[in-house]
Image: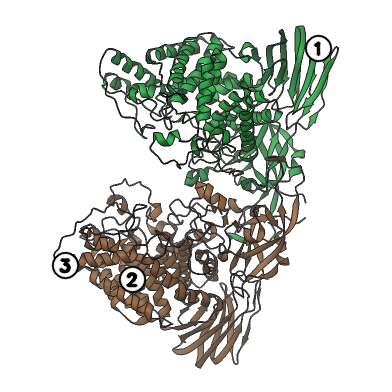
Chain colours: A green, B brown
Amino acid sequence: MGKQTKDRINLTDAFWGEKRTLIREKVLPYQWRALNDQIPDADPSYCIHNFKEAVRVTEKRNRGEEIPVQSVRDFVSLPEGNALLPADETEGSEEAHFYGFVFQDSDLYKWIEAVSYIVETEQDETLERTVDEMVDLLEKVITKEGYLDIFYIIKDYDSRFTNLRDHHELYCFGHLTEAAVAYYDATGKDKLLKLAMQFADYLCEYFGPGEGQCHGYPGHELAEMALMRLYQCTGRKQYMELARYFVLQRGCAPKYFNREHGEPEENNLDYYQADKPVMKQKEAVGHAVRAMYLYCGMTDLARERCDREMGQVVRELWEDVTTKKMYITGAVGGTHIGEAFSYAYDLPADSAYAETCAAIGLVFWAHRMLQLEADSKYADVMERALYNGVLSGISLDGTRFFYVNPLEVDPIACRRDQRLSHVKSRRAKWFGCACCPPNLARLLGSLPHYSYHTKEDTVWLDLYMSGEIDTVLHEKNVSIKTDSALPWKASVSVEVTGQDGIFGTIALRIPEWSSAFTPTVICEGKYETRVEAGYWYVTFYGQTKATLHPGFAMEPQFYRANSRVRESFGRQALVCGPLVYCLEEQDNGKGLHTLVAEPEAASRARQTSLFFINEDAVGYEIPGWRKEPEDTGLYIKASRKEEWEPVTLHFIPYYAWANREEGEMRVWIGQRERN
Amino acid sequence: MGKQTKDRINLTDAFWGEKRTLIREKVLPYQWRALNDQIPDADPSYCIHNFKEAVRVTEKRNRGEEIPVQSVRDFVSLPEGNALLPADETEGSEEAHFYGFVFQDSDLYKWIEAVSYIVETEQDETLERTVDEMVDLLEKVITKEGYLDIFYIIKDYDSRFTNLRDHHELYCFGHLTEAAVAYYDATGKDKLLKLAMQFADYLCEYFGPGEGQCHGYPGHELAEMALMRLYQCTGRKQYMELARYFVLQRGCAPKYFNREHGEPEENNLDYYQADKPVMKQKEAVGHAVRAMYLYCGMTDLARERCDREMGQVVRELWEDVTTKKMYITGAVGGTHIGEAFSYAYDLPADSAYAETCAAIGLVFWAHRMLQLEADSKYADVMERALYNGVLSGISLDGTRFFYVNPLEVDPIACRRDQRLSHVKSRRAKWFGCACCPPNLARLLGSLPHYSYHTKEDTVWLDLYMSGEIDTVLHEKNVSIKTDSALPWKASVSVEVTGQDGIFGTIALRIPEWSSAFTPTVICEGKYETRVEAGYWYVTFYGQTKATLHPGFAMEPQFYRANSRVRESFGRQALVCGPLVYCLEEQDNGKGLHTLVAEPEAASRARQTSLFFINEDAVGYEIPGWRKEPEDTGLYIKASRKEEWEPVTLHFIPYYAWANREEGEMRVWIGQRERN
């Protein structure tokens, strides 16, 4: 088992605690119903149906009964409008039925992983029993080889691993494994872990550089980081070796995916990050979620194997993503074409894809980069993504989800402009391809793990969440209690106690947004402090108690984008602490694009209460102007004086948009120069 | 024959005369080669091939030989990469071959029409002989019923008129007819006219409200206006009646196109302007070229039949198009999805479709609206479209063409952003669907006809082009000689002479762009003047000579868009007289979006010479600023002072962009407020 899971973490944070409670009380039960196709008017999942069908099929086959096999090589997803047959009709039928996307298994695994993070700290017999029942079911289905992908088990077992590029067996394996490790860590139950290891052992045999082995790698990355986690949990090196094989084999000539599909060598593979060997990849390309998961696996490898060269590659990729291809909300993947990274500085606000899962992937990656090198820039991005591009994916009540997270929405444009058909102005109950909702659940469930990291005798506090971490420094128990009023106030203090003495270093991140840093340490005896790479390090020599006040300050500020970002030129976005703010039509009327403010106006901001979010939530009122539409004429001589009406701009946190009336929303607003 | 064609027009205009010479000397010979697939590396047309093949097939059939018929109901165009068989292979083969789009015929007809306008004033035996040869060929192909659409004649004659929605028989008929009338007007040769009348007579029999008749109408409008022209030329009322039937039947329940395709009634037909009866259409929707041609036909009907109700409908549609859906260049059809009108005020610059043919259609329509009611607003739009959105469609040398006319181009974005895949940064040699190039040729060839219109004893000068119009006022010959230095200088004067006395009114348009109007009349005796609806009317009572100096003035001015246009908010475009200007990378460096100017800076503009256009061409240098890209950081606190470098902005006419090095181009530039 990895180091962090030895720690005991108790989250008491008002903001994130509420989200975690939401996950436990609302989101997980809701998603369970979704996986069972019990949400009225929502796209069906078919997920649990498929698992049950796999049991039926397996049992029939075990009885020697024949079930027709279907050629599935080119199957990707259920044709639209093809409804699930009622269970009773399916029961008796000869054919084996699989519905939904080929990777539908993964939604259950993500759900199990999310449940794990909840039951890690809170008793929930219902949730745990449901997981155990599903694990029993999986045990019935896994093949004698150790293979466990429902689509191929139901449809055409002999064709497994024949379409690594488009099908998602290794992706499903990845989520199975993440769930298995998380559930084991949380409960000590190892049945699911053993299934994952069986599958992993089979993969170690099947894939590799050896002669009879398959030289392929996952079409949708994830297995890499999952194998690393399995290695950390079990200590079995072969899992790390397979992760390394998958990573290094990727994009090497001859290109596996081209051979697999009989396509010419020059065929474009950057969608899969498989156009060139990963060690030669300097720019983030292709499907954003896949890229994030690949980079996570690479970062894990760089850290575990102290691989400086690979460390350098992920650093360069990090720079590319975060200085050229990331929205101010921490969202990544600007174009809906291929759900992909666009070229450098192409960050359109209205047609943004900015998939929730991609922002989640960026959080995963940032967390890993921090463990590779403690530089606060990684935590700044992690925080930005978490509070904005991730959190916007879920409604305040936990039952509606965004797949796409634009920074500018006009419902009329979404409805009438087919170029924006991927952009929705309301969150949906569920999706046919529902990768995002359970991904949100597992990230928000496990959030305390992202608040800090440790290495040797240092604990880095990367995100500030109220709560207590019980860890070990120099073989002595230490408790770190954080009090944080974020994101509504910058007040942060950290109390460190160790009955047997604190021997080691506590490092507090100095957030990029903080306009002040006036640190004080309250403790007896000698201690040392230094600031390095955005962290304030405080080293103790045996004290039993210390209180750290970093003295952060935050206030609303306008940010502008680098002028290379054409789409945001002449515009600004309001940021306060970790939160990006936006305007909604409900508070500001129609035509949000006609609202402007001076950059300095942010200093005259007045706080407002946002009860639709919660009692603590803070909005801002900032003086600005509205340009009234001209009465006549489409084009007007610019020498005609423009009419500006002074108005108050009402900002709310971006993550909370689309929780009231449907309407326009806008993050980037016009910048008016000082007069 | 219509009234205008009685007039003799002699164009001597430096600007448009050069274009017309280009059409005669370069464009028509070039396009003839294109129609014959003789342009290396260009998309083949197959147009003439198909006509020749039709002769071969017809002759074989006449000899009683059988040629296999192919079911063509769903055929729309040649599959990509399907090359033309070499002529000799085709010759001997049993099958009948048609290549390219189903409407490929129309390209020849547009070419013939363009030739007609040239030979109307200039001898050109080569061009005329080529037309005559093609007419002989058409005579061989027309069926005994009078049907003349090559696709169906070659492929499946019995299936004619079974897919009015997607196939273009009535569209091809329209172009045949326009060509026939133009060629007859120009040369007096009536062979082609008779073929068109034969086809029209067949249509009059086939379509109509009667029991055994087909109740359909054209999928791509054009036949309506062509039938009106044929009526004006021949005086045969049945052609007007059929035009009226096509117009009024359109969109009536039950919807013909739905029935034709067995589709449900609610199926969306606005692409075809067939979602509701035209008299209830208040908003321009769907495919922009189709819409323009429909509105032309409606305007013709309103005028010829003094139909006030229809006049009101086209007026409302005009307002919708020109005050909500038109680019500043006079281009229309903002979205490439369906080559269509987007919703009101949705006028994106970079992803603009703005098809050359749609701007041409707007010129046609404006010319007709002027004849319905003499209001200079129609001529202002006609002029704007002509000098900008139309003219940008053809390179200065006449051999390259734009189908799409964006107002902002970054070649990198065009190549890397699939959302902009329809936008090209260089003009093409030809297109598989080559509607635009021959459409340009016929408009530019016939341009003098658009410079004025007459009604009773008034002549309205709508566009100013140097030249002479010999017309008749009150049964007396009058010559109107215009001297114009447009678009480079505002100097315009008009000399009217009539040996038998001028009895009537000359109306000079006062252009919207003119910042001055200080009219003088030089003539003896009594005359009257008045200004109405943007025209300066001067009425004469028998003078033999008069000179009119309207005293226009023009200077470069920035225009802004109505603030409802989100995409242009905070931006401005330079306009001088009829010309819209733009910035090109070649003169201004990369990153054109970082260039800004004060609205008043236009008053400090300095003229420059643009020899790459011609010796008279004028560009402008205007003081502005460039924002240097920030060295570091994707998002920067807006309180950090912005660095602006004073620069000189070099503007060239929009129509002349993309005639030098490939690079960025931009019409809408940042507006910086006065400091």
The answer for which chain carries disc 3 is: B
> Which residue lies under the disc numbered 1?
A541
Q: Tell me the mark number nearer the camera, choosing from 2 and 1.
A: 1
The front one of A407 and B282 is A407
Q: Is residue B191 above or below residue A165?
A: below
The secondary element bearing badge 2 is classed as helix
Q: Which residue is mark 2?
A: B177
Q: Is residue B67 above or below residue B578?
A: above
| Chain identity of mark 1 | A
Q: Which part of the image, by quadrant, shows the C terminus of chain B?
A: bottom right
The residue nearer to you, when weighing A61 against A265, is: A265
Horizontal relation, residue A508 to residue B230: left or right: right
Q: Identify the amino acid type marked 2.
A: Thr
Numbered label tally: 3
- Name the foreground residue: A174 vs A493: A174
Q: Position of residue B331 (x, y in %)?
A: 51, 61
Q: CA distance from mark 3 to mark 1?
A: 108 Å
Q: Chain of mark 2?
A: B
Identify which amino acid the numbered label 1 is placed on: Tyr
Q: Which residue is mark 3?
A: B62
Q: Quadrant of the N terminus of chain B?
A: bottom left
Q: Are marks 2 and 1 in contact (CB under 8 Å)?
A: no
